[in-house]
Image: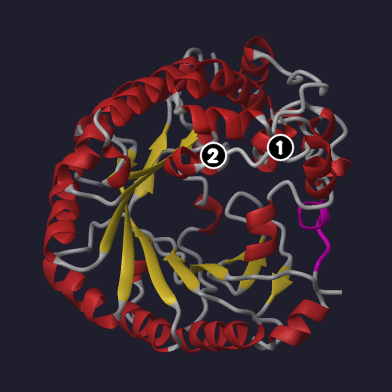
Amino acid sequence: METKNYTSIRLEVTSGCNLKCEYCHNSEYSNRKDDMTTKEILDLISNVKKHYNINKILLTGGEPLLNKDIIDIVSFITDLGIKADMVTNATLLDEKMARRLEKAGLKRVRISIDTLNDERSQRTGSMTATLWKKAEWIAKNTGIEVCIHTVCSPSNVDQMFEVYKKVYEIGAARWRVFDIGYQGRALTNNQLGFEKYYEKLISASKRIINHYLVNGYEDKLDIEINNIFRTILLKAEPRNLDVNEMLKIRLKSSPCDYVADHQISVRSDGTATLCQYFHETILDFRKYEFDVSATIHNVHNTPEYNLIMEELPYCSKCKYCMVCNSGCRARAKFLTGDITEADPGACYICKKVVEEIIPILPKNTQESYMECVNQKGLEPKYNIDDLKKMLTSKGLIK
């Protein structure tokens, strides 16, 4: 019955958070009363490791540094031979804590910074200038790899190029840009307005990528702009594969193939969901006392858990199926009401990537990308006008 091959865990070690981000997608899971104890967290890690070939654990929350036993948890992970990774708002991450985490074996810290200006930040309670200094100190004085996480939204999309330059300036190894998730507080945030957001996102991305390539930064800074560009694409080579044969294989796997098959997302209460954007319980580790075999035997077969690409009636026939991977299922469900529908955001973004981003990339990347495009397939279902109508219907465009 169980065919997953989990290699990593996204683990919420606390639901406690000391900030109140105006767009927080995870607000439903914030500051709860049913968090796992440290013993339960360690039992979970140990037992999942025995069952799967886990090689990385991403510690998150809430704010993971609010867990008073975070150093012990990192040490436990390290002693099991697992890479310890962490995403943090860094408000509690001073030099002493960074040294303790380094000694415990933390390999990477992902610091959430969205902007250069405190007064424009949507992360209420965060001091942006201080965070940049902390990130730079860690990058230059410890063996912990620094990754900057940036949530792009209408409030900061115009600053993306300056944020990118700052990431490079402080010596971070990675920069990951996420599109805002349509969850939690984002739905009631009156400061967000999406009228020109997606056009600006493409424009900012194009400017960043051009600068990145002209200056030869690809060996110094790894970039991932969600659904638009990844540094690893620059090393891609055409393989002269039959797109129809590739498509047959792809259609039998989950639209979210990496998450569904390789990364298990465990909430602070011991339940597991497909990812942070889905809230339906798939596995309940605590209910079965962290016995992994018993937990898997009682899996909850939610739609997102079982979905495969060929069950998406339009996406499976779209010419960009192999490169778009149907976008985000959570966004598709939010905007259209149907988890199997095309993702309107991805429809717009993917077409613009082909038209404006791919042509500025190296020839080998262009060829590799385009050989995965099914030229006989359908055009993307939705355009920018459709996307804006849906955002208006959800109250995100006034």
Q: Is residue 140 left or right of residue 24?
A: left
- Give the label, 1 or 2, closer to the camera: 1
Cα distance between the residues tagged 1 and 2:
23 Å
> Of 46 and 245, which appears nearest the observer?
245
Q: Position of residue 63 (x, y in %)?
A: 37, 62
Q: Residue at 23% of width from left, 75% of height from top?
A: 102
Q: Which amino acid type is shown beneath numbered disc 1?
A: Met
The quadrant of the rendering that contains the N terminus is bottom right
Q: Position of residue 296 (x, y in %)?
A: 77, 78
Residue 230, above or below 361: below
Q: Residue at 81% of width from left, 38% of height from top?
A: 340
Q: Is 388 in the magenta?
A: no
Residue 293, above or below 376: below
Q: Residues within 10 Å of mark 2 (few under 14, many from 20)?
A: many
> Of 374 and 75, which appears nearest the observer?
374
Residue 350, above or below 297: above
- Over which residues does the magenta segment extend? 300-307
> Of 89 and 378, which appears nearest the observer?
378
Q: Label 2 belongs to which residue? A: 181
Q: Is 305 in the magenta?
A: yes
Q: Which amino acid type is shown beneath numbered disc 2?
A: Gly
Q: Is residue 149 left or right of residue 197?
A: left
Q: Label 1 belongs to which residue? A: 322
